[in-house]
Image (cartoon, helix red, strand yellow):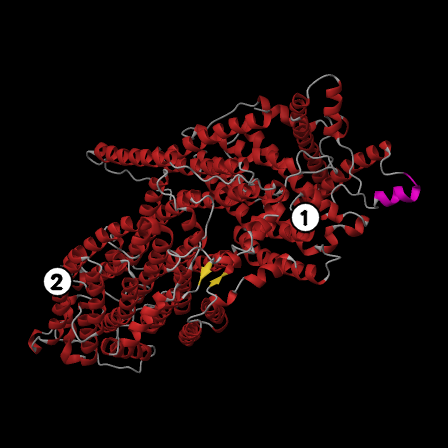
Amino acid sequence: MNLAEGVQIVSFGILAVMMLGAALGVVLLNQIVYSAFLLGGVFMSISGLYILLNADFVAAAQILIYVGAVNVLILFAIMLVNKKEEFKPVRNRWIRQGATALVCVGLLALLSTMVLATPWAVDTTTVNASSTIIQIGKHFFSDFLLPFELASVLLLMAMVGAIILARRDFIPERKATTTEVETALTLPERPRELSGS
Amino acid sequence: MDFSSTVASQLNAGVILPEGLVIITLMVVLVGDIILGRNASRQLSYVAIAGLLGSVVALYFQWDNSQTIGFLGGFNGDNLSIVFRGTIVLSTAFTILMSIRYIQQSGTALAEFVSILLTATLGAMFLCGANDLVMIFLSLETLSISSYLLTGYTKRDPRSNEAALKYLLIGAASSAIFLYGVSLLYGLSGGEIRLDAIAAQLTDLSSGQSLGVAIALVFAIAGIAFKISAVPFHQWTPDVYEGSPTPVVAFLSVGSKAAGFALAIRLLVTVFGQVTPEWQFIFTALAVLSMILGNVVALAQTSMKRMLAYSSIAQAGFVMIGLVAGSDDGYASMVFYLFIYLFMNLGAFTCVILFSLRTGTDQIAEYSGLYQKDPLLTLALSICLLSLGGIPPLAGFFGKIYLFWVGWQAGLYGLVLLGLVTSVVSIYYYIRVVKMMVVKEPHEMSDTVKNYPPIRWNLPGMRPLQVGLVLSLVATTLAGILSNPLFNLANSSISNSSVFQTASTPVILSESIINRQSLSE
Amino acid sequence: MNSGIDLQGSFIQSLQQLGIPPEIAKIFWLPLPMVLMVIGAVVGVLVSVWLERKISAAAQQRIGPEFAGPLGVLQPVADGLKLVFKEDIVPAQADNWLFTLGPVLVVIPVILSFLIVPFGQNLLITDLNVGIFLWISLSSIAPIGLLMSGYASNNKYSLLGGLRAAAQSISYEIPLALAVLAVAMMSNSLSTIDIVQQQSGYGILGWNVWRQPVGFLIFWIAALAECERLPFDLPEAEEELVAGYQTEYAGMRFALFYVGSYINLVLSALIVAILYLGGWEFPIPLDSLAGWLGISETTPWLQVVTASLGIIMTVLKAYFLVFIAVLLRWTLPRVRIDQLLNLGWKFLLPVALVNLLLTAGLKLAFPIAFGG
């Protein structure tokens, strides 16, 4: 084993432990802010794994998008809704937690059996790592052209939709005189409790 | 020849012409709304309908196209996908017809609603023809995200918020599961993303691959079953149907469901051809549960939208019989039934919208005695509901008979018998509504109907509703009697599609794909 | 093309001559440039703090620091020593872990970004493929640290400051990235080395600032906002928020923020110099100068001169920009938060998009001038 391989194995170990630890923290910690910060840790460790896979552009994009945008937005949401609320302790909570743990461990066992039992078809051809961006660009404009373009439509519409849901709307006054139902940004059907009469 | 012209010569971009028309329409609506302002939004929705009809025309001209593979294997525009895409486009056109008045009355912006709806259509259309894993996932997400946005569109209504949130959370979870299953396929096939290439790699199931394939299958089915709201992945359906704007419900129940079935057929037949008995078994279970639960729970509903929600779960169960049958006839019967389901279900929803716009309620009890006040609405709703229940000579009867006949041919006696029994149950709750509307004496009329406003079709946005109502009424009535062309259409769409031949013949599409090695240089 | 001097190669070679195997020699080499760069960054901070004080004083017709050393050059050192010995206070009910981690998370990405800053053909730590993109993505980690310290301080002003800082950072990252994208499109690469080399050959006329004047302005404005310099220092606007997310910090933890902000300023100035002002290039092309004088490119002393001139040019350009930033501080009033966001989203973003489109069009039309 030469130097490079040793470094790779050690860094893989460190990154994997970091990622698993942070991910467990996201799920198990009680305070949601810690979970959110640890999520950033998960994303960063994943980016480290990408670097080990020679995918430098993907690693940088992972940090830019997931840590720099997604995680910051999550934190924003948490900090803007900084509402302390004491929840009533659920009785027999341990039963639920135990059942959840059981299901999760079962799934883990199943998936690990599958991972170990399957002869994975590994692509052994090495790609010239010096030009990952050019590779990605060529794929974007050949066999991934259609998904690439569809993604732009998807993102445009997600943006439009987010603005519609978030913007401050002019709320029309309800006119009682018209023959038909007119509502202010609500469904025309009355809620069930009111419509009993 | 340089890279771009090499790629451009192999793209065969013409296969997505219908989708291209939808995208152009989408842009026209979006930009037109910015330029012209809110007053023009009704005209823009007519533009959208025109664009959708243009897309149908484009689909018609692609029928029996010899070059179906486009975008280097990313998209397959064969006849099967054309039929499903046509169903989806038509359902969107109907949905826009019925949403103009509804959305304007609720005070929300119409043009944005139409453009999000068009995006959902686009996602659903691409899903029908998607031929590689990336494309499948991306179009699925386009459809889902637009659906979440539409569900929460009446944003000051807590029911709508609840529906959107529920749909989003459950949908995200199911997408994640689906993605996990699909990523397993990518790994098992050694890094292939095109469906036929994956199928070619998954031939050797004895040597340890079987567990991986089984898990991939189960996870993929979980994602699909969520889209077609099969029991036990149906929990979102009633709440989402109740809380969403009704035109959205109409689209979700037809367009989105058709896309889900198209995905199911393509993915299961192409990739999981080796494990056909397994997925047929899973779908048998899903069909049994859907038919029983959907029909039985629908009996107890008091709200029209919730009742239609459970009825749509049950209808998905019926359609799954065709999938389980696994023969060409089976798939043809699915296509046929979905096409008929489009008209009868959208017709029913048009009536529900009309009633709730005039009275502000969708309680079944409030419909009593409607016959005296609004005969057209009563007639249309009765016809559509009876057709949904499968009463001859309406269209739904022929659809069901075809499904059951195919199931019987395939030896699925238990499933067909169960379908027959639950159909009888469903007739009960459909007829209950009809009886409520027609039979009641004038003094039994509900207060809402007593205060029924005078019928005016000349109000802005009412005319398209009327057009949609009459069209679906005519189609539901006549499609049964004149169903022969539809039969032929469905059959030829199946028999001419490459999907069902790849199982027997080796992959012959590879010459149109540029060599991966030449790309990676 | 002049390949410059290969320090790594000669270092490893000389160690090998001492009888050390090449792998071990490489291990010896690895930390050297990094340590050098960190030292350089710290010295850069000291210099810019001193500059800031002196120029501010000159702008206000004061003298500024004068007792510590000649012209007060030791004043920043004294400041730093003071901060080291100050008591490190953690406010009551603050979250101790996050309170410590916040400033660390702000500083580390900034220092890491020095990985890709070139001072010459071979004078950088690593010539990454993704080059400038690494800087953009690393700078997006900083808001997490700011939010963390704002939250952990258990102080309303801190939280508001942290939120403002994150909002500002996210908003201005987009025009920044778009401006960089236009440059990357012209150089057909994200690597900082390639970007500088694409500007070489015509001396000062070949610099990107002439081809990308709009991009240059957008980038500079966005970079100032990313560094939270006036007129964009809203997160620590003293009239409104005491000191924003820094309010509760003292001692070494405060020093981390302080050092971080100045390193970030120097780094941004360096990146502007690389992207738009020709990096290590001399205003007159040195190669052709040597050619006229009849000196071979491979002459050792010429290579040494070129390399040192390259370092000097890069640093000079960067400090010129720091000088402008300090002057701006005393000439422009602070913008309001809504003005800040409006400027970012409604002005810079569309202009940056148009700039990108224009660059693409020009690249197709005049491939010689705009990088074929």
Mark 2 vs mark 1: in front: 2
- Is residue B223 at least partly visible in the picture? yes
Amino acid type at mark 2: Val
Q: Quadrant of the C terminus of chain C?
A: bottom right
Q: Quadrant of residue C310?
A: top right
Determine whether the residue tagged by mark 1 lies in a helix, strand or loop: helix
Q: Report the residue that reaches farthest toward the top.
A: C19
Is B35 situated left or right of C10 in this image?
Answer: left
Nearer to me, C253 or C314 = C314
Q: Is residue C294 magenta?
A: yes
Amino acid type at mark 1: Thr
- Is residue B152 at least partly visible in the picture? no
Question: How many residues crowd around disc 2 within 10 Å: few (fewer than 14), some, or many (20 or more)?
Answer: some
Give the residues drawn in magenta, as a range. C286-295
Q: Which residue is mark 1?
A: C331
Q: Quadrant of the N terminus of chain C?
A: top right
Q: Which residue is mark 2?
A: B425
Could you tell me residue C35's position as x and y percent?
66, 26
Give me the residue at 53% from left, 56% from top. Answer: B513
Q: Main secondary structure of the magenta part?
A: helix
> Same chain for the residues at labels 2 and 1, yes or no?
no
